[in-house]
Image (cartoon, coloured by chain):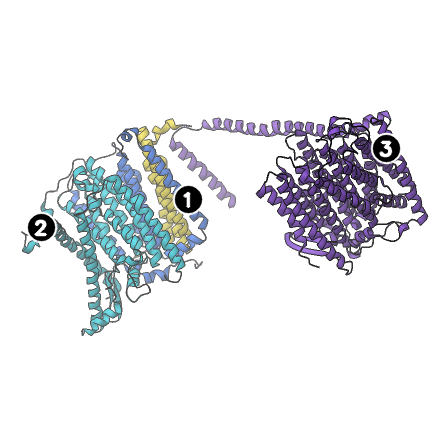
Amino acid sequence: MSEGIVVMGQVNLFQVVVGILALAAAIGVVHSKSAVSSALSLMATLFLTAFLYFAKGAYFAGVVQVLIYAGAIAVLFVFIVMLLDLKPSRVAIPGQKGVALLAFAATAMFVVVVALLAVPGLFEPGLQESNLTALSAKAISYNFVSTYMLPFQATGFLILAAIVGVIMLAKSVRSPSNESRGEP
Amino acid sequence: MTPLLWSLFLVPLVGVAVLTGVPVILMVERRGSAWLQRRTGPNRVGPFGLLQPMADAIKMVFKEENQPARASKFLFIFAPVLAILPPIVGFSMIPIAQPFTINGESFAVQIVKSDLSFLFLLAITSLHVFAVLIAGWASNNKFSLMGALRAGSQMISYEVAIGLCLVSLVVSYGTLNLSEIVTLQGAGSRLAFWGFFMQPLVFLIMWVSVFAECNRLPFDLPEGETELVAGYHTEYSGLKFGLFFLGEYAAMYLASALMATVFLGGYNIPFVSPDQLVSFVEGLGLYGDQATWVASALSAVSFAAKVFFFMFVFVWVRWTLPRFRYDQLVGLGWKVLLPLATINLIGTMIFSFLQKGAY
Amino acid sequence: MIFEGLRWILLAPLLGAVLNGVILQNKSAKISGLVATLASLVAFGFSVVACSQLSGLNSAPEQNFLIDPLFTWMSSGHVYVPFNLELTSITSVMLLVITGIGSLIHIYSISYLSEEESPWRFFSYLNLFLAAMLVLVLASNLAVVFLGWEGVGLCSYLLIGYWYKKPENTAAGMKAFITNRVGDIGFLIALFVAFSFFQTGDISRLAERVNDYAFLSSGVPTWAWYTFAGSLLWAATAKSAQIPLYIWLPDAMAGPTPVSALIHAATMVTSGIFLICRVWPLFAMSPVIVDAAFWIGMSTAWLAALIAVSQTDVKKVLAYSTVSQLGFMFVALGAGSPAAAFFHVITHACFKALLFLAAGSVIHGMHHKQEMSLMGGLKDKMKITHVCFLIGTLAIIGFPLTAGFFSKDMILAKVFAAQGVFGYILLLGAALLTAAYMFRAYTLCFWGGARSEYAQKAHESDPLMYMPLVVLAFLSLFIGWLELPEVFGHFTKITDWVHSSWYGVGVGEQAHLSHLAEWLLMLITSVLSLTVAYYSFKIYQRNPEFKILPEPLHKWSTNKFYVDEAFELLLIKPSMKAGRFINRISDETTFNGLANGSFRFTRLSGRLLALFHTGSVQTYAWHFVFWSSLIVGAIFLWTL
Amino acid sequence: MISLPVGELEFHVFVSIALFAIGAYGFLCKRSGLIALMCLELMLNGVNLFLMTFSKHHSSPDGASLFLFIVLVAAAEAAIALSIFVILSRRFGSVVLDDYRRLKG
């Protein structure tokens, strides 16, 4: 782990764009009318922050962010929001003209995402090793398990407790009504 | 021809390949299921009915798009896009063929050559859940919402099983980079035998959970016709339904590609190492770069064969097994697959610890 | 010189104890008795072999001991305690005494306990006691001696309380154990001093410390010597039942008679004196303590004799006579001659064991009745027991040429040489008292008419019981020959053995008496004690209730000078009161107060803080953010 | 890539602080519990970004390890909090925090 200060270069356009988008999505979370749209904007923010990590070269962090945050926690939020089906906040958006705009947005996103992945600068494994070893998966995991062994074990137990807790809470949710029908 | 240009060129190539593959598998599904049930499939359109998928596509495009009242417009449109996105993006990680050289400089037939490709693949597939949830929510009817929630919970629980399988695979392969995994399974390499033989139990668990991920038959409760009409895409028609349809099949393609790369040795032809392949082609009279081109084409064909094998199994299973009840479905995921995967993980760790030098 | 046999001496009784106590648990006295006797006989055999090995070894004084290293018990820093057994000349004699008399008593108790319901328990305790005593004797390190010391105390508690059905037996056992524990504190202090100041626990090296001048000049504080000797004396007084801590011995008679014979006559009570003999050079370094030993011994001898005179229970008489004889041994130590004390230990072991066993067979004959007032005229019913009891009594009063005569006179001679006439006269008085009460007991038991139907129906006990009596009688007659005074020719076996065990540390004996003086002393003592014996014999034949002591003294003496009551008053009541007082102060007020106080405080603060709860999560969040940012700001400013 | 005059470190720090601020605002001011939870996630993300920036700045993996810990803890916390909200909403019929006033201590 070279302790030297890595000269952080100028911020490139990509980072700026993604940064701004992330902030916009964050504001979306706070100011959106319906809970669902705020949940979705949360998912968007998490996803965009993952791109910020990719831009910084911390691919492992980026993947973890996508996998856990965007892939699991955001899903959980959307799930719960839909489950609780909050009536008052659902507002319909009339009108057809948005279709073209939406189609354009979808494809634009498609191109951006794939292009981004293909840009060698970001994903060249060869390149990746040279410019920043500190944030590579191997370095992080090695550090994570050696110097932070105790917190690692503690978090393990924490998550176990969380799982047990959730099961207990979920179990108590079963109202007596459906118990009579023998539903699980 | 720099690697950058080559990757950019590969992107549309892979996209088109996957999307054209869908009608092929559609045809196989229709004809295959007919053959399984001893009836002749659609053979009116074009010779032997080969143009049937074309007809479906045209129908899809021109069908009238209706929009459920008071459903949130943007989400309704956004869901199908999100459904098609993850599988295609996932394909960028898969090494499709043997690397070939152009005037000495070798090019890998893989869009993204990242060290974390396997993990990234899992991350991307986990985004598929969003499409289902948003579709269910946006179509503003009880059945589709129920279908979406069921599909969501099913996908999450099986994603956990796949995650654990991933961990034990990584322990046995020692790397997360898919191309390295494929070369490891090649004939001349350090390991030299397929993932299937190394981790049979993980193969089984992965196979079952992949079915669940793609909501394919034994696990297609969300679209269970009898209870939930068509699940989360009841309200969709026309192109949007087409996109969903495409997304589902693309996800199947991605799943079988993943299974092929990790378990059946990707583009390796059994018992033939990449250099032997090249020398075999040189034996046929081609030399230098052209030989590597042909060799990598051959390896691509072997990869396609393996993927097709898995696709056929998808179809085959769909028309033989009955549907699971919901609690059996989730129970299988949490109470059977997860413990098995954990035990296997512990076994692999102990084995690899004992074999310290081997991997 | 390494000799593997020593460990078998120790292992045999241990095995016997385990076999009897854990595995066999056989109801019949015959089988369990046989196993136990076999074990002690094996031990006796091995000790005879070991002693012959030792005597054969005539190397320089420093080397003539047998050692059998077993294992290292503990070692940390310079505290190194190897558990190895060592046989020096002095320990060899003690070994023979313990195993010899032990085996005899085992044989005796086979028939004595024939109709008990769980004899195996008795025999396993007896074997355990034997093993503990052997550890105490054979150990080379003070810590291991302490192990034996505790084991012996435990076994005496177990054996005294053998008939646990009766509460007073268990109380007596408890009393014995606790008083011994009080003494053990002394032993511990001696141990600590030995390890910290003398840097070793090994007895032989401790003895050498005395004459290695480098060590002496290295500034060991004088109080260290005094605390070592003083605490050792304190331990000995408890174990050998001297003045302050003798109260447990008379009550220990609650146990079966063989127990009293073995433990409270021959072996355990003498271990205190034996220990002091082994570390005598160190002990002698503090003359004040030696004088203290002298006066403790003298006063115990007198007090015990006075009480014994008026006792009606035959075993109580013998118990008090033991206490007074132990007093004699302490007097010998006080007079600065461990050889005399050790010689008296050996002779006393023989004739006191004989007396106890004889009394035991009398009690056995009288169906467990111990009151002398019920006895009388047993001499024609129990001929052999009568003869043996007579020999024992003659030995104890110092009838010429018996064992008692030689050892008691040696003590008197040493006292005369060291303390002068006054000390001699005092001790002589005690000796005369011994003669008086011993003959009183003898005549009340065996002479005159049978005073109860038990006495009429008394019968001689079976050969298994009187055979050991005969052997002991023989011993108490001829063991005296081991140490002849100057006048009868130079045959001083015991003094050589005792002195050589200090590895050549020359500790000069006191001034020698001229032949004339010795003759004179012998004459006076024997003549006076014989006349007193004759008179008491004659008086008690005619009038069993005769009181030797004048009235006020007699009443005091029958009530054992109210010593127990005094202890009760001075020690036990105040400590109970103090206990209750401290409990009231510390428990009720402080601790309970604390507990209740904290409970009330938390409830109060709980109610107080509840006021802040508005129920709305938002306000909590605000407070949380507000105060945490305040704290972070403060810390930030603080570190600037 | 086109680069702008602003330094990478400063920009990322700015973004993370902004994220944190938005999260804090939402957490404190929104009436619905779910939204508050989401804003909590936002705040955690702001912290994560901050950590990663400085981890890259000092090129030491410690920052990344802490990032991992925060992600894990956030996952556990979200699971528990959401199930609690499910029960609360079932009990009080709504997710709005003010309705839970009766839970006062």
Q: How many numbered callouts?
A: 3
What percent of the width, then of the height, locates residue C437?
A: 83, 33
Q: CA distance from mark 3 to mark 1?
A: 91 Å
Kind of residue indicated by mark 3: Phe
Which quarter shows the N terminus of chain B?
bottom left
What percent of the width, then of the height, locates residue C100?
A: 72, 47
The dot on residue B41 is: 2
Q: Nearer the viewer, residue C624 or C578?
A: C578
Q: In this picture, is B312 found above or below C549?
A: below
Q: CA distance from mark 1 to mark 2?
A: 56 Å
- In the picture provided, is B289 more to the left or to the right than D57? left
User: In front: mark 2 or mark 3?
Assistant: 3
Q: CA distance from mark 2 to mark 3?
A: 138 Å
Kind of residue indicated by mark 2: Gly
Q: Does residue C14 appear in this view? A: yes
Badge 2 sits on which subunit?
Answer: B
Q: Colour of chain A?
A: blue
The purple one among the chains is C
Residue B227 occupies quadrant: top left
Give the labeled residue for mark 3.
C537
